[in-house]
């Protein structure tokens, strides 16, 4: 409570499950993290890591059934999101928290002009006239680099990059405290991606918005975020500042991610893929979820659940190997 | 056929080129006019090497891949494979030719028949081309192929929906290898996959190249992947090659403004004390319909000037093996 003003988002002990006829999918397993005001946290992981389930829980948008939030508390700017009624939530969504979705092609209403779609959000949260709201929509369009004359255009008349700009305009038109961006550039070409990331960066600075950025791309995290949390099979395995996680990597999975990436600056570097596949999320595993794919795994890794070990005030790693004396991963030996 | 083709091979070729593409064009008719998907592209691929083709959506890179195999017919130009002009081959001859040329598609979810098992998919081309007639020998060959691409034997009767993306792409590779090709077009083979699986497939393709002496055309939008994989790179923009060079040269000394912007736009997974200065291009790619005779990159080019309104620059050799199409440099 005392430092409530410094934290934009606090997620504690979140557990998300999907109950299906084929069994219960354990999507998010006891995840806790926070985003400081005006900072950007990158949530990184591969398909099925639980990133999007986490994001949807924060908006309380998880489709239920099959999704169930079993446990946890989510506080956005002082609002306890999971304890709110639908009408209360309506006031928070779009106003306090806004979300940018991965696929700009499906996130827009195809039978409504883009100006109206932005104005709709303004009208929802502010007492103002239709004309004023539409004027605000035009201003937002200009802010994201689209000529205001296109406010009456429909989504199909725009390119992918422009649609994503419209979605950014909708997300930011009510000046939210927290922006959740779920793979905002995955569907875009690299030069357009650079434009959109640049735009998000600039607007975030102007509006002082905090951000949770969900991505599978460590490069985007390096360019956009202050802190990073790495997820694997519904667990956060390593978190810290970007500097800590990138230059003093500790978790074997994080190391595996880095070693799987072709390095544009070092052509000769051999790719070292992570062997095997993600575990079946319907099976509750004993021990560390990454153990079956981990080069450093010992017997206890298959028996005990790893707890967070703190390497600094911000840098935390969930790996049992660090109980062994003198343990270090190859990457940290390489980096000295 | 061979009589026509052999002189063109003898004409000043010293390197052992498995593939030569000359002034290839592919236009599509659209209601708004002719779409220049591929517009006068010339490429060569040395045997056992990899030529990377990079560019953004709509630049024509996939169309080139498909046109080389004549899965779409070229509008004009020549495709010379193994010294033989295949542009004029009939349907039957072309089918035989394709036992030497194969393709791996981007989306392993869409490019496999959902009603065929792993073994059926891998064996189909063998049977269609009558490469092996004995049923038992076919099974042996399938087992061999599965081993080659790292698919465990227990998946032999699995259907695509039972497998994850990485394994599905392995089936796609097994299918391509089944006819013993010399040359494979890899069209974005890893872009639908997660990074840890992507690395497995890239390593597999590299190992297979070494083991079987394959030549690849590797089509991708990912600069770091193409860097890792290729010997030479051609950068495409709106149907044209704008720069072409050996990979080290291209990454160290990119010359074309588009290549520079493309390289600078790639987010690098390294911690940086200060924000990197990036070249941010304005505008977007338009579709290459009814183009004026002018540099196609000009509307987005950060270094465009008056002279750039002149006729479209041709690809010329700037330094040894380094080609560029820009009138500014």
Image (cartoon, rainbow, N blue to C red):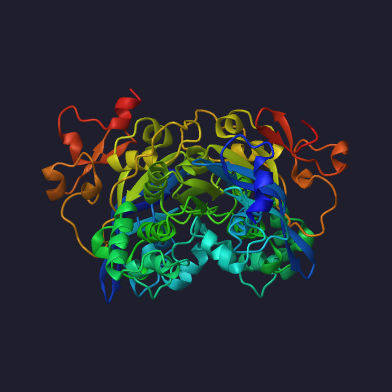
Choose top left, top right, bottom left or bottom right for residue B97.
bottom right
Residue A178 coordinates in the image, percent (x, y): 50, 52
Residue located farthest toward the top when viewing the structure as drawn: A336
Residue A185 coordinates in the image, percent (x, y): 55, 52
Residue B174 coordinates in the image, percent (x, y): 38, 58
Residue placed at 35% from the left, 25% from the top?
Answer: A335
Q: Nearer the viewer, residue B154 or B11?
A: B11
Residue A144 visible from this viewpoint: no
Q: Quadrant of the N terminus of chain B?
A: bottom right
Q: Nearer the viewer, residue B182 or A299?
A: B182
Residue placed at 75% from the left, 68% from the top?
Answer: B30
Q: Nearer the viewer, residue A284 or B5?
A: B5
Residue located farthest toward the front when viewing the structure as drawn: B3
Residue B244 coordinates in the image, percent (x, y): 65, 38
Q: Using residue A39 as the reference point, say whether residue A27 is left or right of it.
A: left
Q: Nearer the viewer, residue A287 or B213?
A: B213
Residue placed at 28% from the left, 51% from the top?
Answer: A276
Q: Quadrant of the C terminus of chain B?
A: top right
When the figure is inspected, residue B268 is found, relative to residue A67, above or below; the finding is above
Q: Using residue A92 as the reference point, say whether residue B67 is left or right of it.
A: right
């Amino acid at each position: 409570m005392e430092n409530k003003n410094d934290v934009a988002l606090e997620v504690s002990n979140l557990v998300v499950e999907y109950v299906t006829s084929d069994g219960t999918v354990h999507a998010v397993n006891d995840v806790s993290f926070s985003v400081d005001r005006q900072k950007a946290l990158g949530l990184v992981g591969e398909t099925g890591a639980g990133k999007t389930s986490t994001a949807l829980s924060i908006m309380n948008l998880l489709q239920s059934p099959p999704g169930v939030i079993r446990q946890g508390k989510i506080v956005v700017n002082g609002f306890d999101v999971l304890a709110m009624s639908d009408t209360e939530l309506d006031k928070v969504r779009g106003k306090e928290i806004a979300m940018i979705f991965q696929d700009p092609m499906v996130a827009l209403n195809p039978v409504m002009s883009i100006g109206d779609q932005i104005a709709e959000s303004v009208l929802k949260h502010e007492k103002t006239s239709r004309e004023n709201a539409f004027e605000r929509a035009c201003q937002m369009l200009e802010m994201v680099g689209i000529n205001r004359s296109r406010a009456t255009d429909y989504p199909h008349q725009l390119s992918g990059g422009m649609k994503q700009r419209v979605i950014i305009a909708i997300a930011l038109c009510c000046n939210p405290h927290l922006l959740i961006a779920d793979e905002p550039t995955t569907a875009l070409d690299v030069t357009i991606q650079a434009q959109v990331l640049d735009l998000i960066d600039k607007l975030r600075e102007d509006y002082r918005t905090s951000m949770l950025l969900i991505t599978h791309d460590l490069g985007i995290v390096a360019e956009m975020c202050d802190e990073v949390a790495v997820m694997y099979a519904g667990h956060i395995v390593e978190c810290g500042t970007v500097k800590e996680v990138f230059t003093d990597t500790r978790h074997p999975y994080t190391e595996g991610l880095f070693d799987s990436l072709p390095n544009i600056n070092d052509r000769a570097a051999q790719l070292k893929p992570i062997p095997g596949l993600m575990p079946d999320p319907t099976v509750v595993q004993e021990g560390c979820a990454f153990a079956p794919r981990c080069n450093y795994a010992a017997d206890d890794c298959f028996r005990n659940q790893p707890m967070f070990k703190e390497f600094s005030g911000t840098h935390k790693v969930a790996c049992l190997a660090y109980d062994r004396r003198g343990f270090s991963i190859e990457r940290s030996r390489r980096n000295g | 056929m061979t009589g026509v083709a052999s002189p063109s091979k003898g004409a000043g070729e010293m390197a052992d080129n498995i593939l030569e593409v000359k002034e290839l064009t592919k236009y599509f008719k659209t209601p708004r006019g002719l779409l220049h998907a591929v517009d006068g592209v010339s490429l060569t691929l040395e045997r056992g090497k990899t030529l990377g083709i990079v560019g953004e959506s709509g630049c024509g890179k996939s169309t080139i891949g498909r046109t080389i195999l004549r899965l779409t017919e070229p509008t004009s130009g020549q495709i010379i494979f193994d010294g033989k002009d295949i542009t004029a081959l009939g349907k039957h001859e072309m089918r035989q030719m394709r036992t030497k040329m194969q393709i791996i598609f981007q989306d392993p979810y869409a490019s496999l028949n959902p009603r065929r098992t792993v073994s059926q998919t891998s064996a189909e081309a063998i049977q269609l081309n009558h490469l092996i007639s004995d049923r038992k020998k076919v099974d042996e060959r399938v087992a061999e192929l599965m081993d080659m691409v790292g698919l465990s034997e227990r998946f032999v009767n699995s259907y695509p929906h039972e497998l994850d993306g990485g394994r599905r792409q392995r089936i796609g590779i097994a299918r391509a290898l089944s006819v013993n090709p010399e040359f494979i077009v890899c069209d974005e083979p890893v872009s639908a996959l997660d990074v840890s699986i992507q690395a497995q497939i890239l390593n597999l393709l590299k190992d297979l190249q070494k083991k079987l002496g394959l030549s690849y055309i590797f089509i991708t939008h990912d600069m770091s992947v193409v860097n890792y994989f290729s010997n030479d790179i051609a950068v495409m923009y709106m149907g044209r090659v704008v720069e072409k060079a050996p990979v080290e040269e291209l990454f160290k000394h990119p010359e074309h403004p588009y290549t520079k912007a493309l390289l600078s736009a790639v987010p690098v997974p390294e911690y940086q004390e200060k924000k990197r200065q990036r070249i941010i291009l304005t505008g977007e790619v338009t579709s290459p319909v009814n183009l004026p005779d002018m540099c196609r990159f000009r509307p987005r080019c950060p270094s465009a000037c008056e002279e750039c309104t002149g006729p479209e620059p041709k690809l010329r050799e700037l330094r040894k093996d380094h080609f560029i199409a820009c009138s500014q440099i």
